[in-house]
Image (spheres, rainbow, N blue to C red):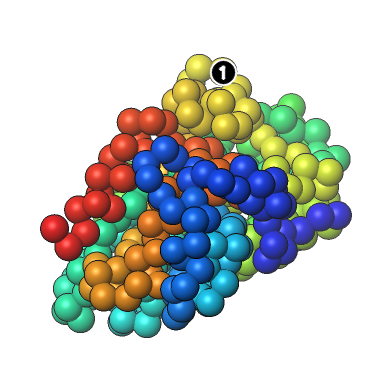
Amino acid sequence: MTFRRAIVPGIAAAALLLTGCSGEDDGGDGGDGESSDISGSVTIDGSSTVFPMSQAAAELFREEAPKVEVAVAESGTGGGFERFCAGETDISDASRPIEEDEVAACEEAGIEFTELLVATDALTVVVHPDLDVDCLTTEQLVELWKPGSTITNWNQLDPSFPDQEIALFGPGTDSGTYDYMASEVVDPDADEPATRDDFESSEDDNVLVQGVAGTEGATAYFGYTYYEENQDSLKALAIDDGNGCVEPSAETARAGEYTPLARPLFIYVANTNYADDEAVSAFTDFYIENLTAIAEAALFIPLSDEEYTETQSALEGIGS
């Protein structure tokens, strides 16, 4: 059974790709030595989904700027914004856009920020590999996860499903993944979106992977990369949103076919930290300059050319 570690598979290959060139043709230093003289530290916290991508960026940047210490943590999107808006971090990873109350907290603390779209994810519903279920409709997914749900057996969702007790695992309420499921899938019109609360929760997606892999009848949902790395111990369900069963993949997410579970991923950068701290600006520039290679190293879906141009423009707008 394989679980994600701090060193993301694919980084070595990505490092070779970056040797002598910047990930995008936009004039990055590409290892010309300018970054190697920079020293300092960069602090990142937030989404466990985006964590592998920022960790990949940190590992690759270490080759360019060995004197810069980049610390990446994963307290969940909500927990990350709490620290970010308290001035404790330079960058916040997020698997959802920042919410109004979080914006207000940042404003109260005098922290201006810039949102940078970095990749696309396919939120993936997984089950124990021996479970004889291959596809859920969006309606069945809502029935399973809505607040107050009394679904406890798979055959309650569909008589053709096995007579097997359901064991539920899911991200905690600080997770942007939880927020996405609650607000975009379960009940987009709810004033206070939520899911059912009778499940085993964790902010660590590896714990969810382990829970499903080791429990008959189990199911969970998390970012596609965690499924992709653990395909030998999990089964991903296709989702039918009205146009037939569609499996999660880079192709279906990018094509807009994997609805409603394809979602954008972000990093938020504190503008003053970027403007005043050479380590923060160098790392952020490197992250965005090499975004495609970093996304692929972390097994995420790279941005389209149009999306990448918008992210570049947002970065260039900091402090202007």
Give the residue drawn at x 69%, y 62%. Answer: 7
- Considering every residue shown, the one lying at the far top of the view is 243
Residue 270 image position (x, y, % from top left): 29, 69
Residue holding disc 1: 244
Identity of the residue drawn at 52% across and 55% down? 31
Is residue 233 visible in the rendered structure shown here?
yes
Residue at the farthest left position: 320
Q: Is residue 161 above or below residue 123?
A: above
Give the side of residue 172 with respect to residue 275, left or right.
right
Identity of the amino acid at label 1? Gly
Q: Position of residue 263 (x, y in %)?
A: 44, 42
On screen, residue 132 above or below 56: above
Front residue of 80/234: it is 80
Does 297 sit left or right of 186 as displayed? Answer: right
Residue 67 placement, left or right of 226:
left
Label tally:
1
Give the image quarter of residue 163: top right
